[in-house]
């Protein structure tokens, strides 16, 4: 697992084919941003009240290839704590 630190800019709830998830936009510097998905039970760790908070998020990488052969890099959040 890898840890990233930054300020939460937004939290968006999404539903894709019945799968609930939350996508966090984390600002890590002036222009560096990362989009982190929290899926399943991990989505309960994130709330919109965390916007503008400095946090540390433990992530894992989950690359996939679609049925059409497209490649995706998924960044999944596993834990989050405010700093």
Image: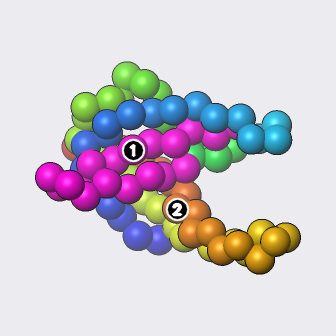
Q: Which residue is mark 1?
A: 25
Q: Is residue 20 left or right of residue 6?
A: right
Residue ranking furthest to the left = 30
Sooner in the amino-acid sequence: mark 1 or mark 2: 1
Number of marks drawn: 2
Q: Residue at x 57, y 69 (%)?
A: 73
Q: Is residue 32 left or right of residue 19?
A: left
Residue 35 visible in the current orientation: yes
Judge whether residue 27 is colored magenta: yes
Q: Magenta segment, which residues?
A: 20-37
Q: Residue at x 82, y 37 (%)?
A: 18
The quarter of the picture where the C terminus appears is top left
**SS class of the residue under badge 1?**
strand
Q: Does the magenta stretch mainly form a helix, a strand or a loop? A: strand
Residue 44 visible in the current orientation: no
Horizontal and vertical percent position of residue 23: 52, 42
Give residue 70's quadrant in the image: bottom right
Q: Residue at x 66, y 74 (%)?
A: 71
- Front residue (pair 34, 78): 34
- Front residue (pair 40, 74): 74
Q: Is residue 75 left or right of residue 2?
A: right
- Front residue (pair 76, 73): 73
Q: Residues within 10 Å of mark 2 (few under 14, many from 20)?
A: some
Horizontal and vertical percent position of residue 61: 54, 70
Give residue 64's quadrant in the image: bottom right
Q: Which residue is mark 2?
A: 75
Q: Residue at x 47, y 62 (%)?
A: 59
Horizontal and vertical percent position of residue 36: 48, 52
Judge whether residue 23 is colored magenta: yes
Q: Is residue 32 left or right of residue 45?
A: left
Q: Residues within 10 Å of mark 1 (few under 14, many from 20)?
A: some
């Amino acid at each position: 697992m890898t840890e990233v630190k930054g300020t939460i800019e937004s939290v968006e709830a999404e539903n894709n084919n019945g799968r609930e998830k939350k996508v966090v936009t984390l600002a890590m510097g002036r222009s560096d941003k990362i989009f982190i998905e929290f899926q399943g039970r991990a989505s309960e760790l994130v709330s919109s009240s965390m916007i503008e908070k400095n946090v540390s998020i433990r992530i894992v990488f989950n690359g996939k290839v679609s049925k059409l052969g497209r490649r995706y890099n998924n960044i999944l959040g596993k834990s989050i704590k405010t700093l």
